[in-house]
Image (cartoon, rainbow, N blue to C red):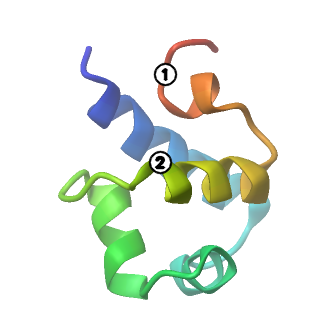
Amino acid sequence: MCYKYLMKEKLKELRKIKAVTQQTVATAIGVTISAYSNYEQGIREPSIEIIIKLCKYFDVSADYLLGLED
């Protein structure tokens, strides 16, 4: 399975668990809502810097976010 697919699914799941909107996450990590929405849809891949911010925001490892561990 492609990590891109896994990451988009993990982002949706983590956001729903945290009960926040896409706008909230986008603001917290410093991107537009359009950019964040594209990450969740798998249209666009986040940069390393944004992956780090996402990991910190959701309190998960990069390995988890990229689907390398459960």
The three-letter code of the residue at mark 2 reads Ile
Q: Residue at x 55, y 86 (%)?
A: 23
Other residues around mark 2 within 10 Å, as few (<14) / some (14–19) / many (≥20): few
Other residues around mark 1 within 10 Å, as few (<14) / some (14–19) / many (≥20): some
| Image vertical order of residue 10 relative to residue 27, above or below | above
Residue 70 x/y as whole percent: 64, 14
User: Do the CB atoms of the residues marked 2 and 1 lie less than 8 Å apart?
Assistant: no
**Residue farthest along the right direction in this orientation:** 59
Q: Secondary structure at mark 1?
A: loop
Q: Is residue 18 left or right of residue 51?
A: right
Residue 16 x/y as whole percent: 64, 59
User: In the rendered picture of this protein, how many numbered marks are placed on residues?
Assistant: 2
Q: Residue at x 49, y 21 (%)?
A: 67
Q: Is residue 25 left or right of residue 17?
A: left
Q: Residue at x 71, y 31 (%)?
A: 61
Residue 27 x/y as whole percent: 62, 86
Q: Which residue is mark 2?
A: 48
Task: Measure the C-alpha gap from mark 2 to mark 1.
Answer: 15 Å
Q: Secondary structure at mark 2?
A: helix
Q: Quadrant of residue 65?
A: top right
Q: Quadrant of residue 39?
A: bottom left
Q: Quadrant of the N terminus?
A: top left
Front position among marks 2 and 1: 2
Residue 22 x/y as whole percent: 52, 77
N-terminal-most mark, 2 or 1: 2
Q: Which of the labelled discs sits on residue 8, or is there none?
A: none
| Image vertical order of residue 5 relative to residue 47, above or below | above
Q: Residue at x 57, y 81 (%)?
A: 30
Q: Which residue is mark 1?
A: 67
